[in-house]
Image (cartoon, helix red, strand yellow):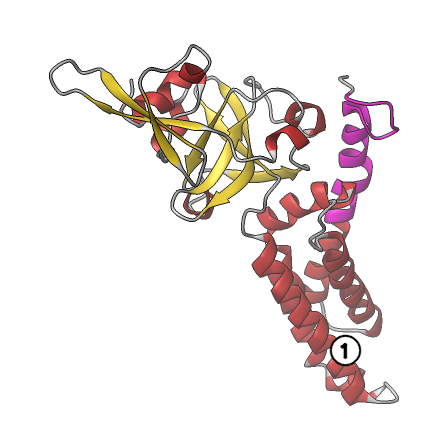
Amino acid sequence: MGAWGYGPMENDAAWDWIAKYAAFPLVTAIEDTLRAALSAPADDLKNHQAEAAAALLLECTSSKEDASFLYAHVRPHAIRKRLWDLAIESLQKVMANRDWLAGWTDPHAKIRALERLVSDLQQSKNTNVKAAIGDIIEVSTLKGYAYLQYTHSHEDYGYLVRVLPGFHQSPRRGFAELVNQVESFYTFIDLEEAIDGGHLSIVGHELVPDRCRQFPLFKAGIKNPATGRVETWWLWDGKREWKVAQLTPEQRNLPVRGVCSLPWLLVWPLRNVCHSALGYG
């Protein structure tokens, strides 16, 4: 298993252990508890368990700048399983149980507490189902599974992602080592539309490496219709652009400014695919 540091959690084996023995059983317990509360006749125990499961879901998926290990593993499962909707529906059933509420010293205070939890869950859902900086996105391509990391948002071009190196024959669980490798390239994509359409999936969350936090430099050019070659180039840093007479060998490796469409992403085997999609092939 790969390691990227000396800490107890800085290796693939540790992250696989967290996913298998902590995150997945926790998500399963939350889901099973909420479904049981919805499907079975209400009783005191199921009401308390549903409330606890909903609160635990909220705790594990609260947005944090320095995301916890559980946040990184639980949130993708919660998105796929729509656990926020399940939790809200379960709590609404609990609040409709007037006999159970009547057993509290102050039923109105209990209702207010449940309403706050429902409101917090709705806010958490609205926040978490959208891509967040640092999210790891899985793409199923003709060569296997590939992974992106969302690093920046641009007012005009939208979501900027790093295309992480390599293809994988089966889905990965740990991403900390992968995100610290040098990316294959950067590109803009319509990430939210692709996720909403079920074509891409949020499967993890990692801090963006320090070296990748600055907005990268891009190249852009115009093809000469007569020759089919780009003869005029500009460089762009996200805010300014400037013309260059010729690209240096280093600048030739810069990413191309533009939004790469989803069909190209789903079939890419090479960096050149996105270049072709943007008219530079």
> Counting other residues with Cα less than 10 Å from the Cα at mark 1, is it few (<14), some (14-19), or many (20 or more)?
few
Name which residue lies at 81% across and 31% down.
17
Q: Is residue 216 above or below residue 247?
A: below
Q: Which residue is mark 1?
A: 113
Q: Is residue 162 visible?
A: yes
- Left or right of residue 227, residue 248 in this image: right
Q: Is residue 12 magenta?
A: yes
Q: Residue furthest top?
A: 249
Q: Is residue 260 visible?
A: no
Q: Is residue 136 above or below residue 178?
A: below
- Residue 50, percent across and down? 76, 65
Residues drawn in magenta: 4-27
Name the main secondary structure of what is drawn in magenta. Answer: helix
Name which residue lies at 80% across and 24% down.
13
Name which residue lies at 41% across and 46% down.
193
Q: Is residue 198 magenta?
A: no
Res 166 quadrant in image: top right
Q: Is residue 14 above or below residue 239?
A: above
- Residue 244, percent across and down? 34, 22
Q: As shown in the figure, which amino acid type bears the numbered disc 1?
A: Ala
